[in-house]
Structure formats: structure tokens, C-alpha cells
Image: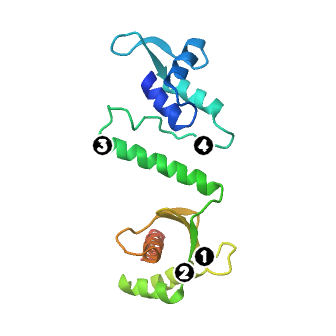
Amino acid sequence: MRTFSVDEAFTILQNNKITSNKESVKRWLRQGKLMGTKGGGPKKNGWMIKESDLRAYLHDRLPAGFALSTNLISTAAGNCSDAERDFYREEGRFEMWKQITSLNIWQGRFEFKKRFVEECIQHLRIENRDLRQYIMDSMLSHKKGYAKPGVLYLQDKCKFDGHILDFARQYGGIDEQITFSVIDYLRTQYKNKGKI
């Protein structure tokens, strides 16, 4: 079970908008509102907080419906490598993306145009006629209550058929990034169904 120092706990509580004062964390520990044990740290006079206790404290104070990230490791802690820090930052960003989109907040909606989808398929040199038709049918029928087919997007991700897809960043414009991302997803789905 991972434990946190006061500094690490403060960073996590600050990131979750619980407090902006480290002394509040110490006071909550002294008062027993936040469970912890004395005798931690290099001088053995600091507090150590179990991950389960910190989770319980956060759960009690976050608004209803707000999903707590499964990762409480602070990216500000000095004991993380750059790779770990990047991983946790991206994981937190993804959790926030899911929460925002669950509230139906989106940056915009991209509409699929038949001619453009055909050009993208041709660019990828997809020769299988059944696969080409599968991609076209899937994309042009993806309306989800709108008059024209398309997807909702936020930042560098879009939602297609209930799946969250990263933009294909190797392409230039947002139209290409979304279209190629969906085509790649459909190609993989088609392949996994044993059609290729």
C-alpha cells in the first residue's frame, strides 16, 4: 500500500481543488479529519498518509458524480522520472476528458463528407472492396441524432461508435486527423471480425 508525505498529499489535494494551504493538511491530520500516522519522513517526525485514507478523504469532499482519478501519485513529486511524470499527466488529462465529455461538453462536431472519405481511403491504398464499403457505410451512417454523419471531438480525441479515438497526428489538418483516425479504427475492427 502506497503512503504519502504531507507534501505529496497536499499536492494531490491542491490538484483536486480541496485546499491551497499545506497547513490545512497538517491541521486536518492533527484533528483526525484526515487519517495519518506520525513518525514518517527523513526526521521521523512527519506524517504519513495511506493511499486508502487519502482516497476516502477525497471521496467525501469531491462533488457527487465527480470521478476520482485512480492514480494519486503526484506529478510534482521529485521522486518521479520524466517518463512516469508524462504518463501520469496524460492519464490525468484523459480522466478529465472523460468527465467533461460525460457532461456532453465538446469542442465541436466534424462532419464526414463522402468525397473526402473516399479520397482518404484512396490515399491509404485500401484495395479490398468489402473493406472500403464497410468503412464508407460505417462513417456515413454515423449520425447519432444529427442530420449529417460525423463525430464530436474535444482537443485531440473524438468519439466514434462509443469508442474514444486519438487523432492521427501525423496528418496536417483536423479533417485529416479525424478521418484517418476513424478509418484506422474501422480497418482494425474489420480485421478483428475476421473479414480480412
* Crowd tier of the residue under label 4, counting other residues whose Cα lies within 10 Å: few below 14, some 14–19, many 20 or above: few
Establish if 105 lies above or below 29.
below
Q: How far apart are marks 4 and 2 (CA)?
A: 32 Å
Q: Which of 2 and 187 is in front in this view?
A: 2
Which labelled disc corresponds to residue 112? 2
Indicate which label's residue lies in the foreground, 1 or 2.
2
Determine the CA span between mark 1 and mark 4.
Answer: 29 Å
Is 1 drawn above or below residue 195 in the view shown?
Answer: above
Q: What residue type is labelled 2?
A: Phe
Disc ID at residue 67: 4
Location of residue 126 by image quarter: bottom left
Residue at image coords 47%, 38%: 71
Q: Distance between the residues labelled 1 and 3?
A: 40 Å
How far separated are the C-alphas under marks 2 and 3?
Answer: 38 Å
Q: 78 or 145, which lies in front?
A: 78
Mark 1 or 4, nearer chain start: 4
Amino acid type of the residue that numbered disc 3 sits on in the rendered structure: Asp
Q: Are the residues at dot 1 and dot 2 in contact (C-beta closer than 8 Å)?
A: yes
Q: Which amino acid does label 1 sit on?
A: His
Name the kind of residue labelled 4 in the image.
Ala
Q: Earlier in the sequence, mark 4 or mark 2?
A: 4
Q: Which mark is residue 142?
A: 1
